[in-house]
Amino acid sequence: MASKASSATLGGLFLVFLKMGAFAFGGVYSMLSFFERELVDRRRWLNEEEFAEGVAIGQMTPGPPIVNTGIFVGYRLKGFRGALAATAGQVLPGFLLVVALASLYSRYKSVPLLEGALKGVGAAVVSLLASVVFRMGRQLVKGWRPALFVLGGFVLLYSAKASPVLLIAAAGLLGYLVYGRGR
């Protein structure tokens, strides 16, 4: 199937990515199927190979993979301005929602009902994070060496207020030295 990339306009890119940003929910992989349906099947702006290339690049580059894929698609179709149009369309719905929620929160944060609900949500988020950390820990920390990495990282982050970026880089280098080079 040949792509019809030439039929894409900057306004069309913006509107398609605005729609995808507003209605694609459920995490990266469910959003990717929405992207594929819209960009490959419906509009035929990309073929399957081009889309797969965009997904791969989106996964490899820093930042949210779905936004990176959108940047790739926009750039592929209309260059730098296409990348800007796709990105603006994709992030605008979420940005507006956050602004609206922040405005509502600042106005109504002292309402007892909302205050109680937010405390409950905050506690639930902490429990979700703790659950993820516990599951990851059970899978990754097997033996005393990984346990020392965990303990050392925790102490450096909590007590010494170490930079997370520097801590990850140091742990990677130390892991390379401890676990061998190319085993």
Image (cartoon, grey):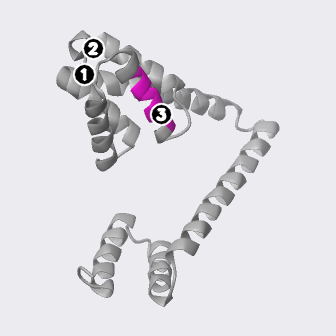
Residue 1 belongs to the span the image colors magenta: no
Q: Could you tell me the amino acid type at mark 3?
A: Met
**Amino acid on which disc 1 is placed:** Gly
Q: Residue furthest left?
A: 79
Q: Secondary structure at mark 2?
A: helix
Question: Of 47 and 80, which appears nearest the observer?
Answer: 47
Vertical side of 104 occupied by 140: above or below? below
Eye-nearest disc, 2 or 3: 3
Residue at label 2?
Answer: 10
Overall secondary structure of the magenta section: helix
The magenta segment is: 30-38
Residue to which mark 1 is pinned: 82
Which type of secondary structure does the marked residue at label 3 adopt?
Answer: helix
- Asked whether disc 2 touches disc 1, contact meaning CB atoms under 8 Å apart, the reply is yes
**Tag 3–tag 1 contact (CB < 8 Å):** no
Is 143 situated above or below 51?
below
Q: Residues within 10 Å of mark 2 (few under 14, many from 20)?
A: some
**Local SS, label 1:** helix
Q: Is residue 13 visible to the viewer in this orientation of the structure?
A: yes
CA gap between label 2 and label 3 equals 21 Å
- The residue pinned by badge 3 equals 31
Residue 126, image x, y percentages: 65, 58
Q: Is residue 62 among the parts visible in the rendering?
A: no
